[in-house]
Image (tube, rainbow, N blue to C red):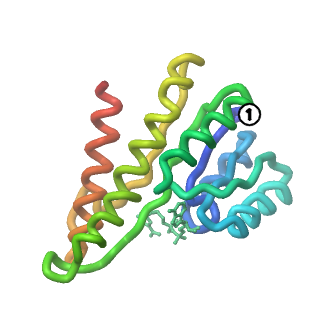
């Protein structure tokens, strides 16, 4: 399905990000496996290569706007296009209103909303120029429903869903 597509995945060193990266490589994509943790990204790449797939492992902290922009520019330089962004990195901080600090709410917002915005913003111009592409943002069932004692998580995941719907409408 994805033969020779260029895919960028964030937080691909573990969990759902890793599973998505492996699945896209299995379908023929060249996967840029990124994670805050360099070793975990390398482990995901090893799984991809062992299964006969293609990709590269890169360190990327999605809280760093300049690093995101530099990585997208590098992908365009090295591969000529970017077909898929799976913006996956996120954080779940438990707690009710009186239990979550302002700093924790900021941390949730930075990963669960702002980073998806910065990443999507970085890829949209090259995707438009090449005639298409896919932006995939990981939200949660907490982006459609509500979880008890999860104010930062439910709020930011709802915002992620709203932002992607707005992107699609625009
Ligand atoms: N696991 C679930 O059941 C579940 C359900 C719904 C949604 N999600 C969402 O999936 C995402 C991650 O979940 P997971 O289960 O795959 O996580 P995980 O804990 O298995 O992996 C998280 C990965 O994120 C990386 N990471 C942490 N901070 C980072 C940063 N600043 N920049 C780049 N990478 C960073 C870590 O190094 C790690 O490899 C979150 O958005 C979460 O809300 C998970």
From the image, which quarter does the N terminus lie in?
Answer: top right
Q: Nearer the viewer, residue 146 or 83?
A: 83
Residue 108 horizontal side relative to residue 27, left or right: left
List the single residue furthest toward the front. 66
**What quarter of the picture does the C terminus occupy?**
top left
Q: Is residue 60 visible?
A: yes
Q: Residue at x 63, y 34 (%)?
A: 73
Q: Quadrant of residue 77?
A: top right
Looking at the image, which residue is at 62% across and 32% down?
82
In the rendered image, which residue does mark 1 sit on? Answer: 3
Left of 82 or right of it: where is 127? left
Residue 42 falls in image quadrant: bottom right
**In screen coordinates, is 37 left or right of 142?**
right
User: Residue 53, percent across and down?
Assistant: 81, 48
10 Å neighbourhood of mark 1: few (<14), some, or many (≥20)?
A: few
Q: Cβ(mark 1) to ligand 1 < 8 Å?
A: no
Residue that appears at 20% across and 82% down: 99
Residue 39's place in the image compared with 6, above or below, is below
Which residue is at 45% across, 38% downward? 120
Image spot of residue 110 (x, y percent): 37, 58
Residue 84 versus residue 106 in the image, above or below: above
> How many numbered discs, if any?
1
Instruction: Find residue 17 and report its image quarter.
Output: bottom right
**Coordinates of residue 89 in the picture (x, y in percent):** 49, 59
Q: Is residue 90 left or right of residue 46?
A: left
x and y percentages locating residue 126 in the rendered image: 56, 24
Residue 1 seen in render: no
């Amino acid at each position: 399905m994805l033969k020779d597509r260029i895919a960028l995945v964030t937080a691909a060193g573990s969990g759902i990000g890793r599973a998505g990266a492996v699945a896209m490589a299995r379908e023929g994509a060249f996967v840029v496996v990124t994670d805050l943790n360099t070793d975990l990204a390398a482990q995901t790449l090893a799984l991809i290569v062992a299964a006969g797939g293609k990709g590269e492992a890169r360190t990327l902290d999605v809280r760093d706007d300049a690093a995101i922009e530099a990585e997208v520019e590098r992908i365009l330089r090295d591969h000529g296009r970017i077909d898929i962004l799976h913006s996956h990195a996120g954080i779940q901080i438990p707690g009710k209103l009186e239990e979550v600090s302002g700093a924790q709410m900021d941390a949730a917002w930075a990963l669960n909303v702002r980073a998806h915005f910065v990443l999507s913003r970085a890829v949209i111009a090259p995707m438009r120029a090449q005639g298409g592409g896919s932006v995939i943002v990981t939200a949660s069932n907490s982006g459609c429903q509500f979880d008890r004692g999860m104010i930062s998580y439910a709020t930011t995941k709802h915002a992620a869903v709203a932002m992607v719907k707005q992107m699609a409408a625009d």
